[in-house]
Image (cartoon, rainbow, N blue to C red):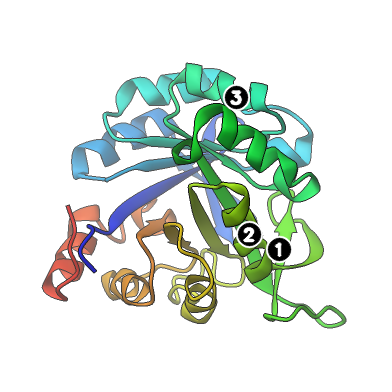
């Protein structure tokens, strides 16, 4: 591993406020996205991810004014996702200040969207967000993991590993792999799922869901993550970005 592993705080935004729950439920307020973005930029975040968590389920577009105000405060790459349904949505987000755009629900519904966005803006702009869970009773996929959509509210029956492979072939620049089972639990990333996807795809992989200690980030990097993403441990002061990078550095993992 020679390329620096990125540490990415995630702003899950609903109605203009950062929120965080457990397994996508029981959301509580975590602050103002602009203020948090400013703080993380100063603390040494390598990138910041902004996800409008209710845009797809509410059937609306991402809140552009909040994106624009957040983008003005940071000097690191900003990825924005939530409610992206067409090439025009990507164009609007890039004009509002996003550097990269995440897609999930709309790409599952119409996979051709991946190629359309990549052809128009380049692979480096496009992040596929995969909200995956272990298959519930009565559902089974070859890998044992299922893709969900609409902010984790709907199961699809689609195999998560196969979907990551297909999306990479269609042109996504990187994959944000979020474990719904681990999300907000602070029990550690889903290393098995991460390793299973890493074995099949070559595009950069962002691990998300479950971070609770600095060691969890180091474990994810060793399991094949090119970047590690977290929310609640940063928002509520459990960990700092500096602590996470120090642990990885001590373990011999290159960080910026």
Q: Earlier in the sequence, mark 2 or mark 1?
A: 2
Is residue 54 visible in the rendered image? The answer is: no
In the displayed structure, 108 sits above or below 201; it is above
| Residue 86 x, y percent position in the rendering | 70, 29
Q: Earlier in the sequence, mark 3 or mark 1?
A: 3
Across the whole image, how many numbered discs are drawn on residues? 3
Q: Is residue 253 left or right of residue 206?
A: left
Which is nearer the N-term, disc 2 or disc 3?
3
Q: Which is closer to the viewer, label 2 or label 3?
A: 2
Task: Tell me which residue sits at (43%, 33%) in the image.
Answer: 33
Disc 3: which residue? 63
Q: Is residue 56 left or right of residue 192?
A: right
Please indicate, yes or no, whether residue 41 appears anywhere in the rendered image.
Answer: yes
Report the residue marked by disc 2.
Answer: 131
Task: Assign a secondary structure to mark 1.
Answer: strand
* CA–CA distance in space, label 3 to label 1: 25 Å
Q: Which residue corresponds to mark 1?
A: 147
Q: Are marks 2 and 1 in contact (CB under 8 Å)?
A: yes
Element under label 3?
Answer: loop
Residue at x 14% of width, y 67% of height: 249
Q: Position of residue 140 (x, y in %)?
A: 80, 80
Whole-angstrom CA distance, mark 2 to mark 1, is 6 Å
């Amino acid at each position: 591993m020679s390329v620096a592993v990125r540490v990415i705080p995630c702003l899950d935004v609903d109605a203009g406020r950062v929120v965080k729950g457990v397994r996508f439920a029981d959301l509580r307020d975590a602050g103002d996205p602009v203020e948090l973005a400013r703080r993380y930029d100063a603390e040494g975040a390598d990138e910041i991810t902004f996800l409008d968590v209710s845009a797809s389920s509410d059937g609306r577009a991402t809140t552009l004014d909040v994106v624009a105000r957040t983008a003005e405060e940071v000097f690191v790459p900003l990825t924005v996702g939530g409610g992206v349904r067409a090439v025009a949505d990507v164009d609007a987000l890039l004009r509002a200040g996003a550097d990269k755009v995440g897609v999930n629900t709309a790409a599952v519904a119409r996979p051709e969207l991946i190629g359309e966005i990549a052809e128009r803006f380049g692979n480096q702009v496009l992040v596929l967000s995969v909200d995956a869970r272990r298959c519930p009773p009565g559902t089974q996929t070859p890998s044992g993991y299922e893709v969900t959509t609409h902010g984790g509210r709907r199961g699809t029956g689609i195999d998560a590993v196969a979907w990551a492979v297909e999306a990479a072939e269609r042109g996504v620049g990187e994959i944000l792999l979020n474990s719904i089972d681990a999300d907000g639990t602070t029990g550690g990333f889903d290393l098995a799922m991460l390793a299973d996807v890493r074995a099949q795809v070559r595009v950069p992989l962002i691990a998300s869901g479950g971070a609770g200690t600095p060691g969890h980030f180091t474990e994810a990097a060793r399991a094949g993550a090119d970047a590690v993403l977290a929310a609640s441990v940063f928002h509520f002061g459990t960990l700092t970005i500096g602590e996470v990078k120090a642990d990885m550095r001590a373990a011999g993992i290159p960080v910026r």
